[in-house]
Amino acid sequence: MHPEFWHERWSHNRIGFHLDAPLPLLSKHWPGLDLEAEARVFVPLCGKSLDMLWLAERGHRVLGVELSELAVRQFFDERGLVPATHETAAGVHFVAGAYELIVGDAFALQADALADCTAVYDRAALIALPPDLRSVYAATAWRRLPAGCRGLLVTLEYPQAQKAGPPFSVEADEVHALLDDDWQIDLAERRDILANEPGFAAHGVTALSTAVYRVVRRE
């Protein structure tokens, strides 16, 4: 999707993808990664996700990247935080407490910006992108994460012909095709969620699952 698509969604508060609580699958599977409390976690296309709050409450430092400055400012405002800002080649950095959120392009982040990220959490980035951009995303942001980085990737699976994305369906075969060269990928859980997503059913979607993968960046 073009950046203007997401700017328009945020400016008109069309953010049905934003959850009003941390994702339960995060709290279920994150502890199994056995990360150090102070680990820095890369959260691509972060919006103002409360998953970042959950991660920070566990002692983690969060590095997010997001196209919408409005989303980033709302995140800090809703926490009662006043961020310091500075600009780099990656974009404008908003920094307060455990959070550093970059208003910029995830594809343009270079390896040095991600070098101390020992963890990654992708709940909404891969499934937000159409197929051509998913391959670019895998070849840039994901490939530039350091060896040993580990985390969770959350996807959706449904008959794509039944509903236009985003969010898009990303099947297991595609996850492996995109990431196998650089990452060890293990399915942690696949869960049928159609009954909990009336919006998908209203579009005539007949099957909907979410999948959670544990990922580890190879040496």
Image (cartoon, helix red, strand yellow):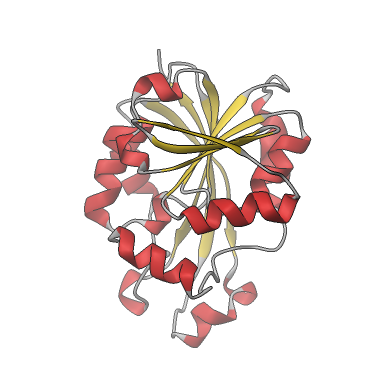
Could you tell me which residue is drawn at 54 percent across and 80 percent down?
Answer: 199
Could you tell me how many numbered marks the image carries?
0
Rendering quarter of residue 29:
top right
Could you tell me which residue is drawn at 39 percent across and 61 percent down?
Answer: 169
Residue 168 x, y percent position in the rendering: 38, 63
Q: In the rendered image, which quarter contains the C terminus?
A: top left
> Seen in the image, is 184 located left or right of residue 99?
left
Rendering quarter of residue 54:
top right
**Can the viewer see residue 168?**
no
Q: In the rendered image, which quarter contains the N terminus?
A: bottom left
Closer to the camera in the image, 187 or 20: 20
Rendering quarter of residue 137:
top left
Could you tell me which residue is drawn at 64 percent across and 63 percent down?
Answer: 19
Q: Identify whether 56 is placed above or below 212.
A: above
The furthest residue to the top: 219
Closer to the camera in the image, 161 or 141: 141
Q: Identify whether 15 is placed above or below 122.
A: below
Could you tell me which residue is drawn at 58 percent across and 81 percent down?
Answer: 198
**Can the viewer see residue 201?**
yes
Residue 90 x, y percent position in the rendering: 37, 33
The furthest residue to the left: 132
Residue 63 x, y percent position in the rendering: 55, 33
Residue 7 x, y percent position in the rendering: 40, 64
> Seen in the image, is 182 located left or right of residue 74?
left
